[in-house]
Amino acid sequence: MDPVIIMPDDVVDAVRRAPNWKSPGLDGLHHYWLKGFVVCHDVLARQFQEALDQKSLPNLFTTGITHLVPKDRDSTDPSKYHPITCLPTIYKTLTSILSTRITRHLNSNEVMSHAQNGYRGGGRGTKEPLLIGAVISKGVKRKDYKKAFDSVPHTWLKRVLELYKVDCTV
């Protein structure tokens, strides 16, 4: 993968695709306003690039606001809540840019087969992802599994990114 250089056009594209009124995180910023303040796009591109070059994100980017949403009417039991975390709009914009770049790399190198279309962004779903999701859901109901993403070691995720030659800065 070519090194990621974030340009103002990348910010424009990411902001254009984002929904206007999703719940913001600590930044309190809705994409609606970011779409209108086009003078910010150059500055954001530069700051995003600096963060990538330094291989470090400011705490504001990765700190979210977590809301507990009750699963049912019994609101006295803590296990009966879904934690929902609202991440900052700025972080969502950066990850959208990086996701677009990774997708472009995977598509241009034909990493994913066409049979995996249900897992591609913008692709029409197929029955396979639905069946896999149904099987996983049944397994989770029968046993006490951790959340899927909590059980995947980050070392394995990094190794997969290396295998597919995704830019190590990302």
Image (tube, rainbow, N blue to C red):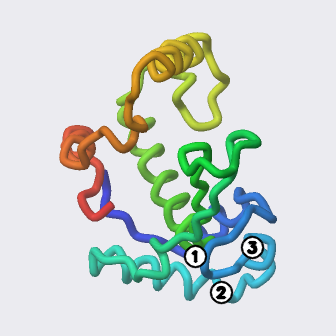
- Marks 1 and 3, Cα distance to the nearest angstrom? 19 Å
What is the x, y in percent for residue 165? 24, 45
Q: Residues within 10 Å of mark 3 (few under 14, many from 20)?
A: some
Query: Which residue matches tag 2?
Result: 40
Q: Quadrant of residue 49?
A: bottom left
Residue under label 1, please give it. 8
The quadrant of the picture occupied by the C terminus is: bottom left
For the residues bearing labels 2 and 1, Cβ distance under 8 angstroms: no
Q: Is residue 162 visible?
A: yes
Asked where in the image residue 20 lies, by quadrant, the reply is: bottom right
**Disc 2 packing (10 Å; few <14; some 14–19; many ≥20):** some
Residue at position x 80%, y 79% in the image: 36
Please tell me whether mark 2 sits on a helix, a strand or a loop: helix
SS for callout 3: loop
Of badges 2 and 1, the one in the foreground is 2
Q: Is 160 placed above or below 119 here?
A: below
Look at the picture and state if 133 lies above or below 2: above
Camera-side residue of 53 and 132: 132
- Taking depth in this image into account, of 142 and 45 the one nearest to the observer is 142
Residue with the mark numbered 3: 30
Kind of residue sitting beneath label 2: Cys
Three-letter code, disc 3? His
Label 2 near label 3: C-beta < 8 Å? no
First in sequence, mark 2 or 1: give its number. 1
